[in-house]
């Protein structure tokens, strides 16, 4: 199949999002992640704009292997020289030069005639050829440029040595069919177009960045310029994850492919979101929190019977562990039964009716019913949790220059007092390791949360934990004015819950992994 080159400009255009500035180590971290994602080209920055941008391009050019490393430059010699210098040690360097071509830019920004624009474009491409053979040229605001003049510029820069010609929809003005027609026209009218790759760079001002890019691919474009999470100037750029997954999911329609390692999309999205501080909206396609979540009872029932009824992609294909059935007022009995089983409760039909009635009452009061809520309902109605172990005392030793140590004493069913101690990465880690040594239950701490139940210095603290034992998740809470004691109570309650569901204690001394807290 035809290979579509993925040109990532997160570190250049994406960083131009207001408030999304990155420091040098962060840029290198993202660039390395993009290399693991297997993007073809990384536009690392605009070296002339600042010493920091120059250093970033230079550092990425040296540190990152695999993708072509690209630097942006205006059609000005000093810009191109700076870009060439920054890319001097790149294994596969590319210089990307641009010059505005639309009438509005010529008249108000550049104040130059068409002939001058052509000359500037040609001279800049030739000058970039002193540093590399891989040269990309962009006629800025191409989608608003007169078709005949756009074709003239494109033909001239290819003759001058451009190996990629990018056709930007700089202000997100184009419509998909209009934009596709522009690409088709260039293929038909530019005599030397076969000597260069046609690229597209679409902004999202009208929410059409991805649609325009995909329309261009269908019209013959072989490179798409995009960003992680759709970051970029104003409303952003075409989203890389949406472009890639549209092509992958509808390979039958596009008849082309990318080389992207799609299982790394979710992790890359989260990294960029964390480092830029630009939060991903919950309903964002592909990588949003709700992208593989279902609340409607009809949808949930269909999903539980056959995933393909309501999902066109596997969540694992983008790096999301699994789909989620979000319990809310639209959920049905089938979803509640499955969630109850996940929490360790096998309900009869009669019990399901009782639990569902209580669930619906709660769901009318809350937007989302969490696993803790479901477990509380089920335990209140049906569970008989026997206290196999009871907390007698806990002693913690911790400080800036000491190793955290916990000593725990438990009472078992026979009334015998058991005591053990353990060290850990933090006081809670040490505490949980000591409890596991005493009970012999091997557990994995998946979640740990603290909140104040009341206000003031004497407020009670509530600790909520999610523990996995033998592949089953168990949720538990502990409350105390001593947060360490609350932590112990919550964890021990989870252990007791696992034992009351048929798991027998094993020999003392089993090791377990807990979070460093």
Image (cartoon, rainbow, N blue to C red):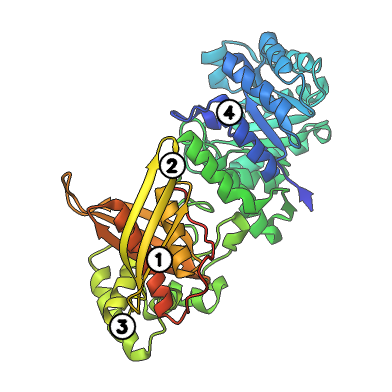
**x, y percent for residue 384:** 32, 82
Q: Nearer the viewer, mark 4 or mark 1?
A: 4
- Secondary element under disc 3, as helix, strand or loop, is loop
- Secondary element under disc 2, as helix, strand or loop, is loop
Q: Which of marks 3 and 1 precedes in the sequence? A: 1
Residue that mark 1 sits on: 326
Q: Nearer the viewer, mark 3 or mark 4?
A: 3
Q: Which of marks 1 and 2 precedes in the sequence? A: 2
Q: From this viewpoint, is residue 344 visible?
A: no
Quarter of image, res 59: top right
In the image, residue 150 sits, relative to residue 277, either above or below, namely above
- Secondary element under disc 4, as helix, strand or loop, is helix
Total labels drawn: 4
In the image, residue 49 sits, relative to residue 494, either above or below, namely above
Q: Nearer the viewer, mark 1 or mark 3?
A: 3
- Secondary element under disc 1, as helix, strand or loop, is loop
Residue that mark 4 sits on: 25
Q: Identify the residue at image location x=48%, y=56%.
A: 514
In the image, residue 130 sits, relative to residue 339, either above or below, namely above
In this rendering, would 391 be left or right of 225?
A: left
**x, y percent for residue 433:** 46, 58
Residue that mark 3 sits on: 382
Whole-Å distance between the Cαs marked 2 and 4? Answer: 20 Å
The disc placed on residue 279 is: 2
Q: Tell which of 394 and 500 is nearer to you.
A: 394
Labels 2 & 1 near each other (Cβ < 8 A): no
């Amino acid at each position: 199949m035809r290979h579509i080159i993925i040109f990532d400009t997160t570190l250049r255009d994406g960083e131009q999002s207001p408030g999304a500035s990155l420091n040098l180590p962060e840029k290198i971290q993202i660039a390395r992640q993009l290399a693991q994602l297997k993007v073809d080209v990384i536009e690392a920055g605009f070296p002339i704009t600042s010493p920091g941008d120059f250093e970033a391009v230079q550092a990425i050019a040296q540190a990152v292997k695999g993708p072509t490393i690209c630097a942006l430059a205006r059609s000005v010699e000093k810009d191109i020289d700076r870009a060439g210098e920054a890319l001097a040690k790149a294994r596969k360097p590319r210089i990307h030069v641009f010059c505005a071509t639309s009438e509005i830019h010529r008249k108000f920004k550049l104040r130059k005639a068409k002939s001058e624009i052509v000359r500037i474009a040609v001279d800049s491409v030739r000058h970039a050829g002193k540093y590399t053979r891989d040269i990309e040229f962009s006629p800025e605001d191409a989608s608003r440029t007169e078709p005949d003049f756009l074709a003239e510029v494109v033909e001239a820069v290819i003759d001058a040595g451009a190996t990629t010609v990018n056709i930007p929809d700089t202000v997100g003005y184009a419509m998909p069919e209009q934009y596709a027609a522009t690409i088709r026209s260039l293929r038909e009218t530019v005599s030397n177009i076969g000597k260069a790759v046609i690229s597209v760079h679409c902004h999202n001002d009208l929410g059409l960045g991805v649609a325009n890019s995909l329309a261009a691919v269908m019209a013959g474009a072989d490179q798409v310029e995009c960003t992680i999470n759709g970051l970029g100037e104003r409303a952003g750029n075409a989203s890389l994850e949406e472009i890639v997954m549209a092509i992958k999911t509808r390979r039958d329609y596009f008849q082309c492919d990318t080389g992207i390692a799609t299982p790394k999309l979710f992790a890359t999205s989260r990294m960029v979101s964390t480092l830029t501080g630009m939060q991903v909206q919950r309903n964002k396609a592909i990588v949003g929190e709700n992208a593989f979540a279902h609340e409607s009872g009809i949808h949930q029932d269909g999903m539980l019977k056959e995933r393909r009824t309501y999902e066109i992609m596997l969540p694992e294909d983008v790096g999301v562990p699994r789909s989620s059935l979000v319990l809310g007022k639209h959920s049905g009995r089938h979803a509640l039964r499955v969630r109850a089983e996940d929490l360790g409760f096998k309900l009869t039909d009669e019990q399901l009716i009782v639990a569902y009635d209580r669930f619906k009452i709660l769901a009318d009061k809350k937007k989302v019913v969490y696993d803790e809520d479901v477990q509380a309902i089920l335990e209140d109605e049906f569970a008989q949790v026997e206290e196999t172990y009871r907390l007698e005392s806990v002693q913690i030793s911790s400080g800036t220059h000491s190793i955290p140590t916990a000593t725990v004493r438990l009472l078992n069913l026979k009334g015998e007092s058991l005591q053990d101690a353990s060290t850990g990465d933090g006081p809670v880690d040490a505490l949980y390791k000591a409890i596991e040594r005493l009970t012999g239950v091997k557990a994995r701490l998946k979640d740990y949360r603290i909140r104040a139940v009341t206000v003031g210095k004497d407020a009670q603290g509530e600790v909520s934990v999610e523990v996995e034992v033998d592949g089953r998740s168990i949720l538990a809470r502990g409350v105390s004015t001593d947060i360490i004691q609350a932590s112990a109570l919550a964890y021990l309650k989870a252990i007791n819950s696992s034992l009351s569901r048929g798991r027998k204690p094993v020999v003392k001394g089993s090791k377990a992994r807990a979070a460093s807290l």
